[in-house]
Amino acid sequence: MITLVKRPTPSQFWAYATPLLAVFATMVAGGILFAALGKDPIAAIKVIFYDPLFGPNAAYFRGQLLVKAGPLILIASGLAVGFRAGIWNIGAEGQYIMGALAGASVALAAYPAESHLLFPAMVVAGALGGWLWGMIPALLKTAFGTSEILVSLMLVYVAQNFLAYAAFGPLKNPDGYGFPGSRNLQQYPSAHNPELIAGTGMHWGVVAAFLAVIATYVLMQRHIAGFRIRTAGEAPRAARFAGVVPAKLVMFCLGLSGAFAGLAGLFEVAGPNGQITDSFNAGYGFTAIIVAFLGRLNAVGILLAGLLMALTYIGGDMAQLMLGLPTAAIQVFQGMLLFFLLGFDLLTHYRLRLGRARA
Amino acid sequence: MDRRSFLKTTAATATLAGLGLPAWASDEPLKIGFIYVGPVGDMGWSYQHDVGRRAIEEALGDKVQTTYIENVPEGPDAERALTQLALEGNQLIFATSFGFMDATVNVAAKFPNVKFEHATGYKRSENLGTYDARFYEGRAIQGTIAGRMTKTNKIGYIGSFPIPEVIQGINAAYIHAKKVNPDVEIKVVWAYTWFDPAKEADAAAALIAEGCDFVLQHTDSTAPQAKAQEAGNVYTFGQASDMEAFMPSPRVASTIDNWAPYYVERATAALEGTWSADATWGGIGTGMVKIGEITEAVPAEVKAEAEKLIEMIGSGEYHPFTGPLNKQDGSVWLAEGETPDDGALAGLNFFVEGVSAEMPK
Amino acid sequence: MIGGIDIVTLIAALMAASTPVLLAATGELVAEKAGVLNLGVEGMMILGAVAGFATAVTTGSPVLGFIGGAIAGALLASLFALLTQILLSNQTATGLALTLFGLGLSALFGKGFEGIRPPPTTKIDLGPLSDMPVLGPILFHHDWVVYLSLILVAVTWAFLKYSRMGLIIRAVGENHDAAHALGYRVIAVRFAALAFGGALAGMGGAYLSLVRVPQWTEGMTAGAGWIALAIVVFASWKPERVLIGAYLFGGITALQLQLQAAGYAIPVHLLSMAPYVITVLVLVILSATHRHGAPAAPAALGRSFHASN
């Protein structure tokens, strides 16, 4: 009989070793899966993990890694702060949509005027849109004690319908031959969020993601507010004695994660995506929740987890192309990676002991 | 508009294959890539494109090598997937969803030596052509059969999205139903999805409840077919794929997206060095729109009439939108004998006179 | 007929339309009552859809198909239980990963089952009852799974409210430490509740592929699992209200389509938001009225349990 004994403090060794162990286990399990599908497992693993980074066209894919990871890291950084405080915003997808809608609306209202002030105004609008959408569960939680998990999730669907309404109605491109979708902001110089250095994938959203990692690191590790947030999550009663006002904390965490998600949406719609369509949101808000946990709710961890997640997407596409693996196999592979990463985390917090349980 | 002859293409292909002529100078096969918006197993839109891809391999054998990426979300992921295909050395790339348009434009600009083809779009360049099918031609056949056979004089239509392609289809179905049955009415339900079985089933149920005994669908699942079968005495048409599982009834005929002849032709052109960026809008005549078997549930004289219409549309003798036709508000759209130019048709955004449904705003 | 809408048909239609989400939501409710939030309902449903379809086609028996769907859903739920209950992983993240995994796995298993029609699921013929006006089409014109789903709701209600096991589940969901101290096996209870939830989600998925569509295609659940999650919240964790919630969510879709069919131009997207907005309002009303009493949501919902905590 194996029993679990909680470690007094999380193990430093296992904190670093478990992700490596999980990736290794995924390679083994994934290899078995790929072999079962009649593909060369070693080649498949290499195509997924190695080729995007060091393969023949790696220069392009490294840039794309940033494009794909940028929004995930930006959203996850905001979410992790709240998760640390025990405030569960799982509606980032909705805040992402509302940020994009708000930012794009500013641009489309100004079209075709050119001004250097437009892009900054869009950034503010994007952050505000996400912030406002995050404030709905925050206010309901502080005023009535309504669960923010459920309200924020419900608001994702409201936002999705609102997005479809906007794409077919008010934001529809008048020159688009009746097809749904807004004007493409990539063709509107003042509103475009372009690659800052051609070929690197670096755009303002990626910059914002890096800044978010640094800011949340400083906040959580070096600032008194971070200490309060962590205390609130780990020992809510003690936090009250330490002067934490729960209502303020809820507003701060949901507002911050909402604003970050809104920014991610804005940078995406003004940059890589270009337009508002009814299928604009590609699930970044939900994937970011996974990224936050894979990164152990820690700023640097999230950076690495976001890049790893992006790597499986890009490598997965490559495996389809080079080896003819179906997307379904890639989804199963990603699922296994997440299960192993989440499951093995146990070793960081608990010690396995052989012997009989006491109770 | 460049109308291609299906016969000429297949003949050329047969010759190539038969004689084994080395059309591609080097030993390297021509690499051809596809991106699909859905899974190849969707049995509808993406599946039909994949049937076309496999037709290229079948027709051209080891002169070509095809690959695809499925389930590609529209937006930056599409742009990356297209770039990936180009970087992997694909010389001819098909982007098979309207939503891939701007991504394809961007990637085509970056790879001037690669040939791109975008389905159902309207943006072209030196190395980016577009292609689309005149699905409305199939709707004319469906309208004729439905108009003749309906007992309730009510025809239901499940629309996906209010976009020109779907509006063309509703108009074509209504015009031809009305032509053979002046009392016919058309009822339109917008599902706002291309594929959602549960919602499509509900939409079909709603139309059947309104007394429609024909349900036409512009969505891809077979759920409306199942609903019709359950209701009894309600007929349907296969959409995108043949949906032959519901033959002979409720599915009495079908409009099949048949990309195979076009794909084979374009691949052959690329091999021979004669490819150029065109705007192709194929129909029954070129084989891009194929009418599936009309079953025995359709009376013989109606079947004959439908077949006559298929022939007339196919030969170019008859255009499904031939005036006199008025717009829904009563103003004149087409004068006696007039047909619309393809540009106007491609942007069609109004119903014809007699359709009672309101266009969603 | 009211305003061109045939109410009888509408109700009959939405009963069948709501069956998949009703089953999935009832299952999820039991899991949440035990204190576990499993966001992987969509993944369990679609795995149930393919497993049910494959079983029914292979054996020729829709009954076996539904059993197969239930087993597949329960197996996937057990994986979730293993991760969250024994390996103590975060429930939200694990649930999301479970959906991804289920979608992929179902597509892999489903290769080769596309384009086939399953054996028909029989309608129960209740003779004269079925021919009654109004009540006939509404109540006595369905297949057996519709009745089974209604029975399951009733059984779940009675089980949670009156049985000893139901009491234990609720205790575990409210305060796992106290339940543990009383000698209940928290992890075993949650494992069972999750497996039950997975089984019902799998059955709901099988209903989609065997009755609703009926066909197997990749991604065919199209978000039904997420609606089931919303319904549990709407129902404020009460089985009898799950029935209302499922019919409301299904009903609004059916209603907006019927309004369109009757020729009304309606703002579809704004109407489609309505059930979610209503759910938020219900949540607010519940939490406002329960301010000083027992909260509506199980208190331990979403928290990990470890005996030495």
Image (cartoon, rainbow, N blue to C red):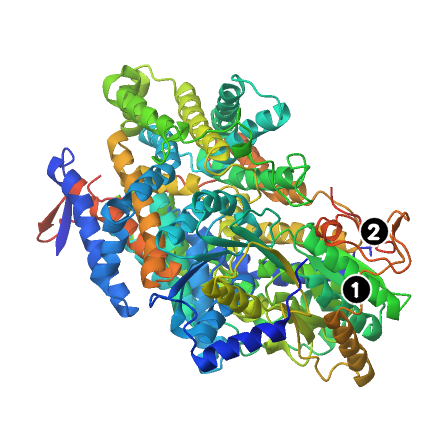
Vertical placement of residue B264 versus A145, above or below: below
Residue A140 horizontal side relative to residue A226, left or right? right
Residues marked 1 and 2, same chain: no
Callout 2: helix, strand or loop? Answer: loop
> Callout 1: residue from which chain?
B
Q: Quadrant of the C terminus of chain B?
A: top right
**Residue at 28% across, 25% down:** A230
Dot 1 crowding, Cα within 10 Å, few <14, some 14–19, many 20+: some
Residue at the spot of label 1: B319
The amino acid marked with disc number 1 is His
Task: Pick the quarter of the image with the N terminus of chain B.
Answer: bottom right
> Residue at the location (31% across, 17% down)?
A225
* Residue beneath disc 2: C3
- Return the x and y of residue C48 as percentages of the image width and height: 44, 65
The spot of residue A164 in percent (x, y) is: 61, 42
Is C36 situated left or right of C24 in this image?
left
Q: Type of residue at label 2?
A: Gly
Is label 1 in a helix, a strand or a loop? loop
Q: How far across and down, in percent of the image, does residue C221 sit?
A: 51, 59
Q: Along the horizontal axis of the image, is A66 left or right of A148?
A: left
Q: Is residue C207 visible?
A: no
Q: Residue at (72%, 62%) from the top-left corner? A: B136
- Image location (x, y in percent) of residue C32: 42, 48
Q: Chain of mark 2?
A: C
Identify the residue shown where x is 35% and y is 44%: C93
Q: Measured along the vertical axis of the image, is residue C81 above or below residue B301? A: above
The mark closer to the camera, 1 or 2, is 1
Front residue of this view, candidates B78 and A244 = B78
